[in-house]
Image (cartoon, rainbow, N blue to C red):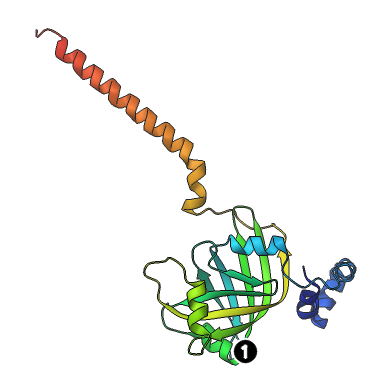
Amino acid sequence: MSESFFEIAFTPGVKEQQTEHGSRNQYERMETALAGYNKLGPDEQNFISLRDSFYMASVSETGWPYIQHRGGPPGFVHILAPDLIGFVDLRGNKQYISVGNLSHDNRVALFFMDYPNQTRLKILGHTEIHEHDDLAPALIEQFRTAEPNAIIERAILIHVSGFDWNCPQHITPRYTLDELAPKLAPLRGRIAALEADNAELRRLLKADEQLKPAT
């Protein structure tokens, strides 16, 4: 957790709830211990670089929160500095709710999930959208992924204002096909060997039947 996360997220109302439920003293001690710790460290940077998706919350002009999923190959979110990350925004269903919200209020909250290891990283930040300006072409080229059918519309930078790791409670482990492949490889190899053995036994049985004298 960063010191600035406390400053942003722990509003007076939040502190009242912490006091009521007995956690305020614990968080006050943590806030003191984390003084000046506000940039993404090696652990946070490595965690983000391995993710293939995240959830992004923005706020509409009517005050409603809105959450969208963003995905790509691992590493599609680039670490540009300890307090700056970026990615390309791909064409979707053309509702443009997040982009519209961010043109009004550039604050975002991100959730990066590691389901197999039941770990999540929360990031608060301010966005900087590059679509029709001079920086857009270079940023888009820098963040471009190898996805063959992806249509890139803009580059989005996020200036990190604060972050926090969550505990693993209540995160159900889930696995992608790529994550399952190493664990399934021995089983698939064993199945292939058994199928080969079975085919050989069938061949031998058929050959034995052909050698039997007709009755």
Q: Tell me if residue 62 can be seen.
A: no
Element marked by disc 1: loop
Q: Quadrant of the C terminus?
A: top left
Q: Picture quarter containing residue 23?
A: bottom right
The residue under the point 59% across, 92% down is 104
The residue under the point 37% across, 33% down is 192
Is residue 15 found left or right of 40 in the rendered image?
Answer: right
* Outermost residue toward the left in this view: 215
Where does the image place residue 40, in percent across and percent down from the top left? 72, 68
Where does the image place residue 30, in percent across and percent down from the top left? 86, 67
Where does the image place residue 206, in percent across and percent down from the top left? 20, 19
Residue 48 higher or lower than 134, as above or below: above
Q: Quadrant of the N terminus?
A: bottom right
Q: How many marks?
A: 1
Q: Tell me if residue 127 can be seen.
A: yes
Amino acid type, residue under disc 1 in the picture: Asp
Q: Mark 1 points at which residue?
A: 105
The residue nearer to you, when weighing 77 against 191, is 77
